[in-house]
Image: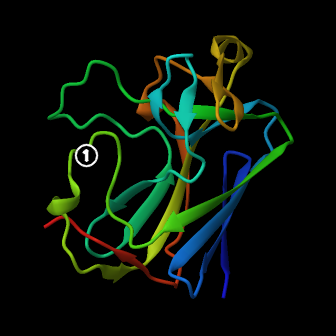
Amino acid sequence: MAEQLRVEADQCVLEATLEVDSAGGATLAYTFQNGSAQNAYVFNLIYEDIGDDNMFLANPNAVYVQADGESVLLSKEVIPVPPTLLVEKPFIPCATLVEAGATTKEIIHLSLPLRPWHHYLMLEDEDFADEPVELPPSFELGFFLATPEADKLAKTVKTPVGEAKYFYPFSASSQKLLRVGPFTAKLPVRLPK
């Protein structure tokens, strides 16, 4: 059975629905509504790499997974670089432009069991417990409301699912976050050993 949760902040609304199917998968569908007078850019296109033709190899089903043993957070956002890690360049997901008064929707097909993942987490399959634990999930979406000057900084890039916007540099602390959850359903998660 599907469960829908909603949160509103900064004149924007996030509605998310989680449905666990009997075949061992789950679907997370969300709608982001921009009720502000500014353009919003939603960091929802996480990519693995940039191809030779400068295509950002984004996967619409990619979500960051962070678990603490009590709950699991699924997110599409700019993850801050951990303070103990030195990186050449921070990872910034591609963004979808949601104009003032407009809405964007996405359906994410989750493969279960989940395991913690983001671009700065350096773990291999053998680093995770064999047996998953059941944890209640939440969903978080990162975005920012743009000034006309910020709109001019948006670089249009190609992805396998169409054009997207890209901002670099961009600080994780500059994004706004909308979070729903936890859902009552629990998802299996393989935690780090």
Q: Is residue 11 left or right of residue 82?
A: right
Tell me how many marks there are: 1
Q: Identify the element where label 1 is drawn.
A: loop
In this picture the colour scheme is: rainbow
Residue 116, image x, y percentages? 32, 59
> Is residue 115 shown above or below 23?
above
Image quadrant containing the N terminus? bottom right
Q: Quadrant of residue 115?
A: bottom left
Q: Quadrant of residue 81?
A: top left
* Amino acid residing under circle 1: Leu
Residue 140, image x, y percentages? 52, 55
Determine crowd level at label 1: few under 14, some 14-19, many 20+ residues with C-alpha closer than 10 A: few
| Residue furthest front as drawn | 52
Q: Residue at x 59, y 83 (%)?
A: 21
| Residue furthest right as drawn | 101
Image quadrant containing the C terminus? bottom left
Residue 25, image x, y percentages? 53, 75
Q: Which residue is mark 1?
A: 121
Q: Is residue 33 left or right of residue 119?
A: right
Q: Residue at x 16, y 61 (%)?
A: 126
| Nearest the eye: 23 or 108 | 23
Q: Residue at x 34, y 53 (%)?
A: 117
Residue 45, image x, y percentages? 58, 40
